[in-house]
Image (tube, grey):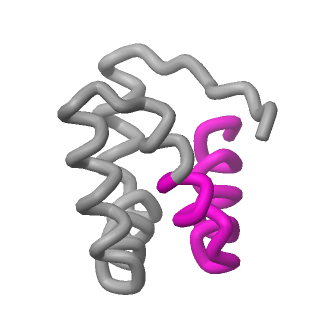
Amino acid sequence: MDQKIPQFSPEQLRQLASSPVAQRLAAMLQQDHGAAMDSAMASAQKGDMAAVQRAMATLLADPKAKAMLKKLQEERNG
């Protein structure tokens, strides 16, 4: 799991989060993996980033999530 996490400015994050693909990804993850999403959020609030990484790795292993993330990357790279 040695993937490099891209760096975003606050404005880039706002744009990314408001993208229709990001909205669909968030909805799909909440619908299909709600408990894991809630656990990741709770871990983040506690500062347990290792638990967040484990939860997100599981969530993002979903083939639908991977496809949407690829679309987001393509949108970002133009």
Indicate the position of residue 2 as horizontal and vertical percent values: 80, 32
At x 31% / y 84%, what residue is drawn?
31
| Picture layout, residue 6 above or below residue 35 | above
Queried whether the magenta region covers residue 40, the answer comes back as no
From the top left corner, tell me how far across and down residue 13 is, in percent: 37, 30
**Figure check: 22 above or below 68:** above
Residue extending furthest bottom? 32
Residue 27 image offset from top left, x and y in percent: 31, 74
Comparing 59 with 20, the one in front is 59
Q: Kindly identify the residue that appears in the image at 41 percent across and 58 percent down.
A: 22
Q: Residue 71 or 63: which is nearer the viewer? A: 63
Quadrant of the rendered image containing residue 63: bottom right
Residue located 70% across and 49% down the image? 74
Q: Position of residue 29 (x, y in %)?
A: 40, 72
Seen as rendered, the residue at the extreme right is 2
Residue at image position (24%, 61%) is 38
State the predominant SS element of the stretch in magenta. Answer: helix
Q: Which of the pair 63/51 is nearer the observer?
A: 51
- The vertical placement of 75 against 38, above or below, is above
Compared with 61, 64 (above or below) is: below
Quarter of the image where the N terminus is located: top right
Residue 78, image quadrant:
top right
Left or right, residue 51 beside residue 58: left
Q: Which residues are magenta?
A: 55-78
